[in-house]
């Protein structure tokens, strides 16, 4: 649209979404960019009828920028759903076109490189998560007590802190993560930790650790097996992830690929 020789910019529209409503649908065509003003939105892919979470975004974060940066009307590479009642601003790409065109070529190149890496990482996360879901489904049909090792594991020796899910957030028990996979961890702790808190199969804990890449990893995991070394006064617990959000799963997926 042109008015008095100048291009008229489309207005910024504010939209409200109820919890559970779809903002963007993977595979649809669209050019709009969304800024979260209020609430939280989950970005996800779909595989086998399941939603594979990629990220959870909040106030001030942007959705739909890939279409703009790819410089064309393309299919959406992921879906977005409101996790709670949310308000989003909707921008037309022409609102940002002038600022983008004025960017130095080297900055555009850096932005495009970062975009390509992000797309590849999201694809890897979706693939890993879908594979994990398929293996978990198969595991449901395996006779209890049958040893299973679903994923390649990396050996580690990283400090961590953990606590039972029903304990105070101020509680900090120490341990060491001895191995890790996309399915869970092997956690070694001092046997004295079990004097005041149960450390048996079925117990669930929150765990926070730093990967060798200096990336923080936080998750909830359930004990699947327990082995006690009375001589050393230690307990080795095989744990399976119960909850790990999109960002943490992406961090783990990248580490496992490194």
Image (cartoon, rainbow, N blue to C red):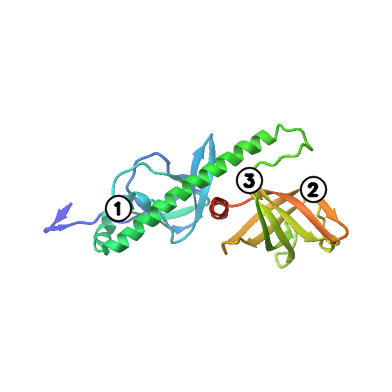
Q: Which mark is residue 201?
A: 2
Q: Which mark is residue 236?
A: none
Q: Earlier in the sequence, mark 3 or mark 2?
A: 3
Q: Which residue is mark 3?
A: 152
Can I make out residue 15 in this image?
Answer: no
Q: Which residue is mark 1?
A: 92
Task: Tell me what residue is drawn at x 39 percent, y 43 percent.
Answer: 76
Q: Position of residue 231 (x, y in %)?
A: 88, 60
Task: Tell me what residue is drawn at x 70 percent, y 56 percent.
Answer: 178
Can I make out residue 105 in this image?
Answer: yes
Q: Is residue 194 or residue 150 the one in the foreground? A: 150
Task: Tell me what residue is drawn at x 77 percent, y 51 percent.
Answer: 203
Q: Position of residue 149 (x, y in %)?
A: 69, 42
* Labels 3 and 2 touching (C-beta < 8 A): no
Task: Tell me what residue is drawn at x 81 percent, y 56 percent.
Answer: 235
Q: Residues within 10 Å of mark 3 (few under 14, many from 20)?
A: few
Separation of residues labelled 3 and 1 (CA atoms):
45 Å
Q: Earlier in the sequence, mark 3 or mark 1?
A: 1
Q: Is residue 61 above or below residue 124?
A: below
Q: Position of residue 220 (x, y in %)?
A: 67, 53
Check the image and name the residue furthest to the left.
Answer: 5
Q: Secondary structure at mark 2?
A: loop
Q: Is residue 102 above or below residue 204?
A: below
């Amino acid at each position: 649209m042109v008015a008095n020789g100048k291009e008229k910019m489309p207005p910024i529209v504010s939209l409200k979404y109820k919890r559970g409503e779809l903002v963007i649908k993977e595979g649809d065509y669209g050019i709009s960019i969304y800024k979260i003003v209020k609430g939280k939105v989950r970005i996800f892919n779909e595989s086998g009828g399941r939603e594979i979470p990629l990220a959870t975004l909040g106030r001030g974060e942007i959705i739909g920028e890939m279409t703009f940066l790819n410089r064309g009307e393309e299919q959406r590479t992921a879906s977005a759903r409101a996790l709670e009642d949310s308000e989003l601003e909707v921008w037309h790409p022409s609102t940002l076109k002038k600022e983008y065109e004025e960017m130095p070529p080297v900055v555009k190149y850096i932005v495009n490189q970062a975009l390509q890496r992000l797309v590849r990482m999201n694809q890897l996360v979706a693939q890993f998560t879908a594979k994990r879901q398929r293996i978990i489904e198969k595991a449901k049909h395996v006779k209890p007590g049958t040893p299973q090792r679903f994923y390649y594991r990396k050996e580690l020796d990283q400090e961590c802190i953990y606590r039972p899910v029903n304990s105070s957030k101020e509680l900090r028990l120490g341990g060491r993560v001895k191995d890790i996979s996309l399915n869970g961890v092997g956690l070694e702790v001092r046997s004295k930790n079990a004097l005041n808190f149960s450390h048996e199969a079925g117990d669930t804990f929150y765990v926070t650790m730093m990967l060798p890449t200096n990336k923080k990893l936080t998750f909830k995991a359930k004990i699947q097996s327990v082995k006690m070394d009375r001589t050393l006064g230690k307990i080795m617990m095989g744990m399976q992830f119960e909850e790990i959000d999109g960002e943490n799963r992406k961090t783990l997926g990248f580490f496992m690929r490194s």
